[in-house]
C-alpha cells in the first residue's frame, strides 16, 4: 500500500503527517556501500526494506550536501549537490525513487542559519566591495575593547570582537578575517558563518534552492536551528554567562524580531506551491510553548511542527549539558504535559527521545544493562509514542542501541565535545571529570555505526569505520532483533501499527495522571468514545498502581512483557520493572468507563485538578 496516499483518519484535513512516524538517518553512520568506512546514499538505499518493514512513513535524511565536514555536514558549501563522501545526485535520485516506491516520503535536512566558510557566497562576501558583503554579518573591530570578552588566539587584540557573544561550540562567536579586515559572526563553529536574513537577496536565494529540491521530488524539510535566523541588527552585548568571559546573545537572536515574518514568507514562496504534500519541521532551541503555538498554528502558515529541547535539558546540571544529573520523573511529566496542553487546541507536537545531537535514551533515562536494556527501551518508546504528536525514531533506537564506551578523548570525533574538552582543561578542570560528562552526553553516542549484525564491522562497513563500532553490537543488532518476536525492534513495529490503526493515538485528548509520582508515568488519550490508558514504570522495581476497578477489566492492546496470563483482564495492577502497558476502554450504552478520563483536556484544565478524577 502507498502510505503517502493511504486512508489515515488524519489525512481528512490534509495533515497526513499527524498519523505518520518519521525515521531519521544519519548518513555517515547508517550503511557503507563501498567499504571506505563512511556511510553513503547507496548504502541507505540497500537498507530501505528495514524501514519499510518497521512501518515508518518518512525518512528524514541528515545533510548529504558538499561540506568540509567541520560539523559533520551541518556546514554546507553547496546547497544543490551531494558530497562525494555520500555519492552524487544520481545516487540521491535512486534513493528518492526507492523511498517513494515503498510508499514512504523523504525529508531533507536544511541548514540556512549559516553556511560553510567554503561556500562561494561567503568567499565572495570577504571582499568589502562585493554585492554579497551584506549576505553575512561582517563588522569592524570594537573601538573600545570590552575587558570581559576574550579571544585568546585571535589575530586581533583581546576584546576587539564586535560584541561579547559566545559560540555554542565554545569560544567567541566572532572570527577575524585577515583578508577582509573585519570580523564575521558564527553562532556555531568558525567554519559556519551566519547568513544575514535581513538581506532580501539571501532569502530569495534560499527559497530558490528549496524549490529546486522540492521540484526534484523531496517531500519536505527539517530546518536546522531555524528560529535563530533573525537577529537584532544592532547585535548588542549580552549579559555575561556566570563567571565566564562571554555574553549570552540569545535575547538578540532566539526567536528574533522578524523570524515569524521570514517563515511566513518562506511558506508563501516555497511550501504553498505544494499543498497537502509536505512535512516541515523547525528545530528551535529555546523555543517556548507560547512561541511554538504561533509557529505551528495552521492559520499562520509557518511550519507544521517544531523540535523543542526542554525535555532533553532536564538532566543538565548547573554546568550545562556536560554536567549531567539524574532525571526527576516529575520534571519530565510536567514538561511534556505542559507542551501537550499548550498545543492541544492549536499547533502540533513533535515527539522524540533521540537524534544525532542527543545521547542514547536507553542509557540516559532507562537502564542499558543486559537485564533491563530491552524492556526499558520499549517502555520509553511506548510512553513517547502514545503522546499527541508526530513521533521521530532515530536510527538504532528501534534496536535499543546504547551509549558507547569511550575510553579517552581520542575516541571522540564531534567538534562540540573536542572543543569543550580543550576549553575545560584550559580552565583547570579534572580531565576524567570532563570525560565523564562527555561519555554521558556527547553527541558521538548517537553517531556510532548502525548495528546491523554481529560481524566485526557490525554489517555497517567492510572497511574501518570513521568512528568505532559499539562493542555490544555482537548482542545488540538488527539481524538478531528481527529473529526475536520479543525484541525492541518488533515492539516498535507494534507501536507504529497501533498509531496507524487507532485514531485515539493520533487525535485523542491528553490527560496526565499521577503527576507527583516519581516512579510511574501515566496518562490517558480520549477520542470519540475510546479512551487509552498508558502506564510506564520508570524503575527497576515492581510498583503497584491504584486504578479504578473498571480499568482492570480493560483490554490490553500493547505491552512490553510476554503474555504469561498474569496480565489478563482483572489482574492486580502491579507494574513489573520497566513495564509499559496500553489499555483501551470503549463507550457502551452511551457512557464511557473512564471514571472521568473521557473529559476533554480543556475541561480537565479548567477544573484545575489534572487527572485527579481518573485516579
Image: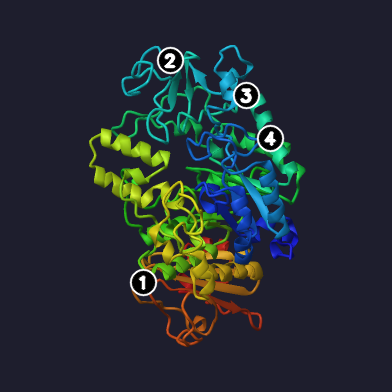
| In front of the other: 593 or 453 | 453
Picture residue at 39% right of the left edge, 77% below the top: 576
Residue 343 visible in rendering: no
Work out how far the residue at label 1 is from the one at label 3, CA to CA, in angstroms. 56 Å
Mark 3 against mark 4, which lies toward the viewer?
4
Q: Earlier in the sequence, mark 3 or mark 4?
A: 3
User: Quick one: label 1 or label 3, which is nearer the N terminus?
Assistant: 3
- Compared to residue 576, the image places residue 72 above or below, namely above
Question: Splitting the image into 4 quarters, where does residue 374 fall?
Answer: bottom left
**Residue bearing mark 1:** 371
Q: Vertically, is 174 above or below 613?
A: above
Camera-near label (1 vs 3) is 1
> Foreground residue, 152 or 532?
152
Disc 2, SS: loop
What label sits on residue 209 in the rendered view?
A: 4
Tell me the residue that label 2 is attached to. Answer: 141
Look at discs 2 and 4 and give the one toward the viewer. Answer: 4
Amino acid at each position: 500500500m502507498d502510505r503517502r496516499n493511504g486512508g489515515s483518519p488524519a489525512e481528512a484535513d490534509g495533515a497526513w503527517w499527524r498519523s505518520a512516524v518519521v525515521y531519521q538517518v544519519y548518513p555517515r553512520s547508517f550503511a557503507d556501500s563501498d567499504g571506505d568506512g563512511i556511510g553513503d546514499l547507496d548504502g541507505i538505499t540497500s537498507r530501505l526494506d528495514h524501514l519499510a518493514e518497521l512501518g515508518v512513513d518518512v525518512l528524514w535524511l541528515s545533510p548529504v550536501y558538499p561540506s568540509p565536514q567541520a560539523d559533520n555536514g551541518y556546514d554546507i558549501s553547496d546547497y544543490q549537490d551531494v558530497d562525494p563522501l555520500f555519492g552524487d545526485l544520481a545516487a540521491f535520485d535512486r534513493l528518492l525513487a526507492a523511498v517513494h516506491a515503498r510508499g514512504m516520503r523523504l525529508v531533507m535536512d536544511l541548514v540556512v542559519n549559516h553556511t560553510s566558510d567554503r561556500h562561494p557566497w561567503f568567499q565572495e562576501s570577504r571582499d568589502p566591495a562585493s554585492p554579497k558583503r551584506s549576505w553575512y554579518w561582517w563588522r569592524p573591530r570594537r573601538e573600545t575593547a570590552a575587558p570581559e570578552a576574550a579571544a585568546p588566539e585571535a589575530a586581533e587584540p583581546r576584546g576587539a570582537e564586535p560584541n561579547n557573544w559566545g559560540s555554542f561550540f565554545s569560544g567567541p562567536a566572532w572570527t577575524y578575517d585577515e583578508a577582509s579586515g573585519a570580523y564575521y559572526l558564527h553562532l556555531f563553529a568558525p567554519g559556519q558563518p551566519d547568513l544575514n536574513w535581513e538581506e532580501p537577496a539571501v532569502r530569495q536565494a534560499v527559497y530558490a534552492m528549496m524549490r529546486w529540491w522540492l521540484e526534484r521530488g523531496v517531500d519536505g524539510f527539517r530546518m536546522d536551528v531555524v528560529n535563530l535566523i533573525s537577529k537584532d541588527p544592532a547585535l548588542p552585548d549580552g549579559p555575561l554567562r556566570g563567571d565566564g568571559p562571554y555574553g549570552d546573545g540569545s535575547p538578540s537572536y532566539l526567536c528574533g524580531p522578524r523570524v515569524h515574518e521570514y517563515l511566513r514568507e518562506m511558506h508563501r514562496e516555497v511550501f504553498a506551491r505544494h499543498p497537502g504534500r509536505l512535512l516541515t519541521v523547525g528545530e528551535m532551541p529555546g523555543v517556548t510553548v507560547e512561541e511554538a503555538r504561533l509557529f505551528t498554528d495552521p492559520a499562520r502558515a509557518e511550519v507544521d511542527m517544531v523540535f523543542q529541547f526542554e525535555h532533553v535539558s532536564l538532566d543538565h546540571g548547573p554546568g550545562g549539558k556536560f554536567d549531567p544529573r539524574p532525571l526527576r520523573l516529575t520534571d519530565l511529566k510536567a514538561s511534556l504535559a505542559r507542551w501537550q496542553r499548550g498545543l492541544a487546541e492549536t499547533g502540533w507536537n513533535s515527539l522524540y527521545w533521540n537524534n544525532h545531537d542527543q545521547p542514547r535514551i536507553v542509557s540516559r533515562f532507562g537502564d542499558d544493562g543486559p537485564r533491563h536494556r530491552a524492556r526499558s527501551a520499549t517502555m520509553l518508546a511506548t510512553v513517547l509514542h502514545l503522546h499527541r504528536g508526530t513521533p521521530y525514531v532515530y536510527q538504532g533506537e528501534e534496536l535499543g542501541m546504547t551509549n558507547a564506551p569511550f575510553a579517552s578523548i581520542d575516541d571522540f570525533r564531534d567538534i562540540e565535545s573536542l572543543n569543550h574538552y580543550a576549553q575545560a582543561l584550559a580552565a583547570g578542570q579534572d580531565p576524567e571529570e570532563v570525560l565523564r560528562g562527555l561519555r554521558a552526553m556527547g553527541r558521538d553516542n548517537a553517531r556510532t555505526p548502525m548495528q546491523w549484525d554481529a560481524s566485526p564491522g557490525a554489517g555497517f562497513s567492510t572497511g574501518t569505520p570513521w568512528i568505532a563500532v559499539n562493542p555490544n553490537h555482537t548482542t545488540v543488532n538488527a539481524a538478531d532483533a528481527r529473529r526475536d518476536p520479543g525484541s525492541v525492534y518488533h515492539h516498535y513495529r507494534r507501536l507504529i501499527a497501533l498509531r496507524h490503526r487507532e485514531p485515539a493515538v493520533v487525535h485523542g485528548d491528553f490527560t496526565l495522571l499521577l503527576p507527583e509520582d516519581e516512579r510511574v508515568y501515566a496518562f490517558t488519550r480520549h477520542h470519540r468514545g475510546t479512551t487509552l490508558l498508558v502506564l510506564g514504570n520508570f524503575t527497576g522495581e515492581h510498583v503497584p498502581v491504584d486504578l479504578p476497578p473498571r480499568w482492570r477489566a480493560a483490554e490490553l492492546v500493547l505491552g512490553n512483557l510476554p503474555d504469561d496470563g498474569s496480565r489478563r483482564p482483572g489482574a492486580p495492577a502491579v507494574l513489573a520493572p520497566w513495564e509499559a502497558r496500553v489499555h483501551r476502554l470503549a463507550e457502551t450504552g452511551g457512557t464511557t468507563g473512564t471514571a472521568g478520563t473521557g473529559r476533554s483536556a480543556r475541561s480537565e484544565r479548567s477544573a484545575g485538578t489534572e487527572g485527579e478524577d481518573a485516579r
